[in-house]
Image: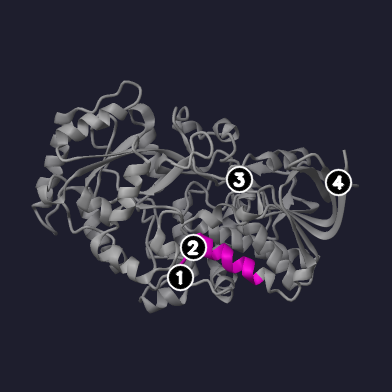
Amino acid sequence: MTTETHTTEVVIAGGGLAGLSTAYELLDLGKTVLLLDKDEQENLGGMAKKSFGGVHMIGTPHQKRSGIEDSPDAAFEDWLAYAEFGPGDDLPRQWAKYYCENSRELIFDFLDQKKVSFLPIVNWPERGTGNGGNRVARWHITWGTGYEIIHRLLRALDAHPNRDKLQILFEHEVSGVETTDGRVTGLHGKRLGDSQYRVEAEHVVLAAGGMCGGDMSMLKKNWYPAWGEPPKVLLNGAHQYGDGMLHEKVRELGGVVTHLDKQWHYAAGVHNPAKSRPFDGLSIVPPRSALWVNALGERIRNPGPLVAYTDTRHLVESILKQPGKYSWQVMNWKIAIKELAVSGCNYMDAFRYKKRLLLVKHLLFGNKDLIRKLAAECPDDIVMADSLEELVKRMNERNLDGLVVDGDVLQREIDAYDADVDRGPGAFEDEQLQLIEEFRKYRGDRARLCKFQKIADPKARPFVAVREFILARKSLGGVQTDLSCRVLKEDGTAIPGLYAVGETAGFGGGGIHGLRSLEGTFLGGCVLTGRVAGRAIARG
């Protein structure tokens, strides 16, 4: 069996957004770079390329034009309250503070220089449920989705004056880290064929993602204990090669891998019609005007009703307490076409292909094509009916573990909600309607929200029900790093020559988010840590 050998100044394991950002920074600083990616060339960019493209940033021109008063100090206060860092989480705290203080320069300016543009109205997810959250809008949606971020960055790499210093090798799996006299000096692995390879390098950067994808065995092994056993149906929305193998290699070198039980999952996953792997999942952006019920038809309360855009971790925790550990959202056609979306580029045509007129049409009249497409491609998870009786029948045909929706219970839940809608703004007693009323005060939400829509409104039918499972997405923990992205040992010293960025590093420090993400901090964290690592390597 042949072994190919490469020599370079810096080798990067992983061609996602973190790896590409690191490579660009290194080229800026005149370094010679070899980037290895296990995937095919068409998938360069990883999960970022498939994402919706939201980025968490503070003090941007978009915020200022919208009259949003924000500051790094205010953002850091929100981050701390939401993260609920534990004892000893000094490095994650330092990284969170660094993110808030430097997002404008290291993330926004970097992307802006690559001609990445954002929608003029900043979005406002993760407002919290009494434990912090975003007090102002900070989620900047890329015009063109995550695909555009990767497309622009690759174009910038190709046009870079030092492009001849960058080599990218595809279908190269990294299986080991090489050391000499205690210093990391390269990587080795195999091509997706017969040959093996070795890379000799002065510096090694691990940018291979997290451990929530693959066969999910490592994810389940590190499942958050307070959540009990993982659900029988756990959908996979992470990268297929995110198996955590390099985390184990870091451990073998004496490096710290921490907080792997801190995982970021979504509450509203449906089976991906692509079926590219077992339990392939598609992340739904859940409507805020829908009723979130369990498999018995009971509205889920913990203690208040579940509402999207508040606290994603709280949603997940609440559903994991329910029979079967999955849920349904019940709505009608009018709510679905106005509020239901997909967190990814492949279904959001107006955003993905930058069709302004189509976007305006969807905002004014609803995205009917999307709902029809989802209903046709996900018939096991999305059902429609003109009567509630027929809807319940179809829901029960899809219920798992012998669970049965009680039609009378669901009818009472809908009747109670609709009766409160009749009270009108300012008089709502239902906490969901109170939240919707608050959301609608912000113009960015008002355009995407129904105006206090009854569920059983005959003019808004058919009824629509979406069966939703927990969808695995991100590892919030990872390889522990200092503020130069150097991989650390238990005694706090760095492993010479070894760096980690992006999800591999828990987006900074082995867990920059603590328990929760303020959303958009994943893409932002990849750019931030990549640039920090590049600068640290250049400093020597």
Task: Give the SS element for disc 2.
Answer: strand
Q: Amino acid at mark 4?
A: Thr
**Answer yes or no: do the residues labelled 3 and 4 have beta carbons within 8 Å?**
no
Report whether residue 286 is seen. no
Q: Residue furthest top?
A: 402
Give the residue pinned by disc 1.
Answer: 118
Q: Which residue is painted at 24% across and 65% down in the image? A: 364
Q: Amino acid at mark 1?
A: Phe
**Answer yes or no: do the residues labelled 2 and 1 have beta carbons within 8 Å?**
yes
Observer-nearest residue: 288 or 484? 288
Give the class, few, some or many, for how many residues have Cα within 10 Å of label 4's Cα (few <14, many ≥20).
Answer: some
Residue 403, given in percent of the width and then of the height, sits at 29, 23
Residue 1, given in percent of the width and then of the height, sits at 87, 38
Observer-nearest residue: 317 or 236? 236
Residue 466, given in percent of the width and then of the height, sits at 30, 40
Q: CA distance from mark 3 to mark 4?
A: 23 Å
Q: Is residue 508 above or below residue 32?
A: above
Q: CA distance from mark 1 to mark 3?
A: 27 Å
Q: Earlier in the sequence, mark 2 or mark 3?
A: 2
Looking at the rendering, the stretch of residues picked out in magenta corresponds to: 143-156
Task: Give the SS element for disc 3.
Answer: loop
Q: Is residue 212 above or below residue 202?
A: above
Give the residue pinned by disc 4.
Answer: 179
Q: CA distance from mark 2 to mark 3?
A: 19 Å
**Answer yes or no: do the residues labelled 2 and 3 have beta carbons within 8 Å?**
no
The numbered mark at residue 55 is 2
Q: Earlier in the sequence, mark 2 or mark 4?
A: 2
**Answer yes or no: do the residues labelled 1 and 3 have beta carbons within 8 Å?**
no
Q: Amino acid at mark 3?
A: Gly
Residue 48, given in percent of the width and then of the height, sits at 55, 56
Does residue 154 belong to the magenta stretch?
Answer: yes
Q: Quarter-wise, where is residue 127 in the image?
A: bottom left
